[in-house]
Image (cartoon, rainbow, N blue to C red):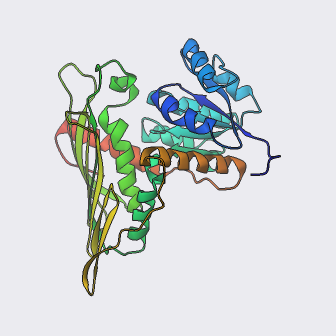
Amino acid sequence: MSPHRTPVRVAVLGTGAIAQVVHLPILSRMRGVEIAAVVDANHSIARTIATRFGVPAAPRSEEEVWADESIRAVVVCTPSHLHEAHVRGALRAGKYVLCEKPLALTADGVERILAEEGADRRLLVAMNQRFRPDAAALKSFVAGGDLGHVFYLKTGWLNRRLGSRGRSWRQRRASGGGALMDLGVQMLDLALWILDYPEPERITAHTYREAGAEVEDSAALMLRLKGDRLVNLEVTSNLLAGRDQQFLNLLGGSGSASLSPLTVYKEMESGLVEVTPALAPGRENLFTASYRNELQHFVEVVRGEREAEAPREHVTLMRLLAAAYRSAEEHREITL
């Protein structure tokens, strides 16, 4: 980057865990980026976080960010039910926007966002799983046909039960949903992205919530896709085990693969051969690396070094989640 280039000034909306653990630490160390402001409904928390990360301003409302023409980009880390309003407001103010998932709570909400001027050029959704080096390598195998027709993909994200339960906005129905909305969005998107988002046909889902809980802490679904493909998804925020589990297993007519670690097998004339690529070693775990790659991509879009594509796949994704919840409630398969 040229030393004379004006830094990209970014505002972060929301100071929850994802902002404090991921976005703020990474952005604060990125060359050519300046965190100009942090905003939170709790202004005292915003001021504390601003001081911790050396951010010069903690406005009392997002409207102050919209009005500041020097701020070019906004990272939306607020609770899910606020995403639509915050993204639309930022787009209308001419900002570039990176929004944590989900983009909106419904497909209609996503459509409303996509109808805003600039959504096709200035909007990205933080699907960080797509920016994992191992996931990108696996997608290239599938896209190149190396594993033959991929007919089955099983994926999941099983998080351990941690601390007290029922106090976070994530456990409130008004925020949109539980484990399926929080964890399922990412892994279902990863599976469909690897397969290049085939047209969905039918879905069956089951959810479980503890007595007195507003939302599910566990869910499983089976999704039938055009082209005789099947995706199996499992998620929970209530795993009683020693560590979290995140996985993806893929079966094809000429091979198989899994994450993580990345392992790829391919059938050749000599027999079954492991063809797992050697990825460049990194000092970060896959989670941190994926977010760093994603934020770097976003900053390059803001600078005009990359082009953004309207996240229209998110319409499909949210329709699938709505159908999954309906299937679970009605105890039947839903035709899409």
Looking at the image, is 116 positioned above or below residue 210?
below
Residue that protrudes farthest toward the right in the picture: 4
Number of numbered discs on residues: 0
Q: In which quarter of the image is residue 209?
A: top left
For the point 33% across and 24% down, which residue is it? 171
Looking at the image, is 314 positioned above or below residue 141?
above
Horizontal and vertical percent position of residue 199: 36, 60
Looking at the image, is 250 positioned above or below residue 293?
below
Side of 128 where 68 appears, left or right: right
Horizontal and vertical percent position of residue 217: 25, 31
Side of 120 where 129 appears, left or right: left
Looking at the image, is 278 positioned above or below residue 69?
below
Q: Can residue 182 be seen in this view?
A: yes
Horizontal and vertical percent position of residue 257: 30, 64
Horizontal and vertical percent position of residue 194: 39, 60
Q: Quadrant of residue 150?
A: bottom left
For the point 57% across and 39% down, which residue is it? 26
- Given residues 65 and 110, the one toward you in this image is 65
- Given residues 27 and 100, the one toward you in this image is 27
- Given residues 224 and 274, the one toward you in this image is 274
Q: Is residue 197 visible?
A: no
Residue that protrudes farthest toward the top in the picture: 44
For the point 31% across and 31% down, which residue is it? 178
- Given residues 195 and 284, the one toward you in this image is 284
